[in-house]
Amino acid sequence: MKTDTYITIIVAMMVNAVVFGIGAVTVLAVPALNVHAKYLLPAVVVATFCITPFIACRIAPRLRLRYWRERGELPAL
């Protein structure tokens, strides 16, 4: 497997946790949504799994040094 794939998988796990946390806290903190938490929390899980790959694919290339080298945005050391 390519390095980009490994980075994307690792980033996807972290993104999944953060997006699920945001969704779960939102559902449980808002009283109007808390009433329907039995149905909304599984929906948050499904939505998280659907959204995660797209976010991870946007973030992962930016973790490589060559991305910043190609753009000419390396910080001066």
Image (tube, rainbow, N blue to C red):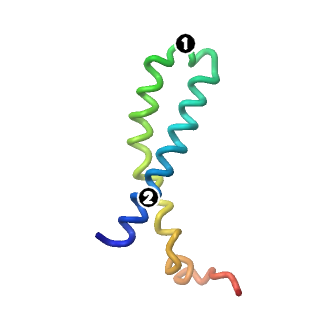
Per the image, the residue denoted by label 1 is 35
The x, y position of residue 56, in whole percent, is 45, 56
Check the image and name the residue furthest to the bottom.
77
Check the picture and name the quadrant holding the N terminus: bottom left
Q: Nearer the viewer, residue 69 or 4?
A: 4
The x, y position of residue 6, in whole percent, is 38, 65
Indicate which disc, 1 or 2, sits on the residue closer to the N terminus: 2
Which numbered dot is residue 27? none
**Is disc 2 placed on a helix, strand or loop?**
helix
Up/down of 29 relative to 72, above or below:
above
Q: Viewer-nearest of labels 1 and 2?
A: 2
Check the picture and name the quadrant holding the C terminus: bottom right
Per the image, the residue denoted by label 2 is 10
Among the 4 quarters of the image, the one containing residue 43: top left
Q: Nearer the viewer, residue 56 or 70?
A: 56
**Is disc 1 placed on a helix, strand or loop?**
loop
Mark 1 touches mark 2? (CB < 8 Å): no
The x, y position of residue 57, in whole percent, is 43, 59
User: Which residue is at 42% across, 33% downward?
Assistant: 45
Check the image and name the residue furthest to the right.
77
Among the 4 quarters of the image, the one containing residue 2: bottom left
Identified by mark 1, the residue type is Val
User: Which residue is at 50% across, 74% downward?
Assistant: 64
**Residue density around tag 2, few if under 14, some if 14–19, many if 20 or more, within 10 Å:** few
For residue 43, side relative to residue 19 (left or right): left
**Residue density around tag 1, few if under 14, some if 14–19, many if 20 or more, within 10 Å:** few
Up/down of 22 relative to 6, above or below:
above
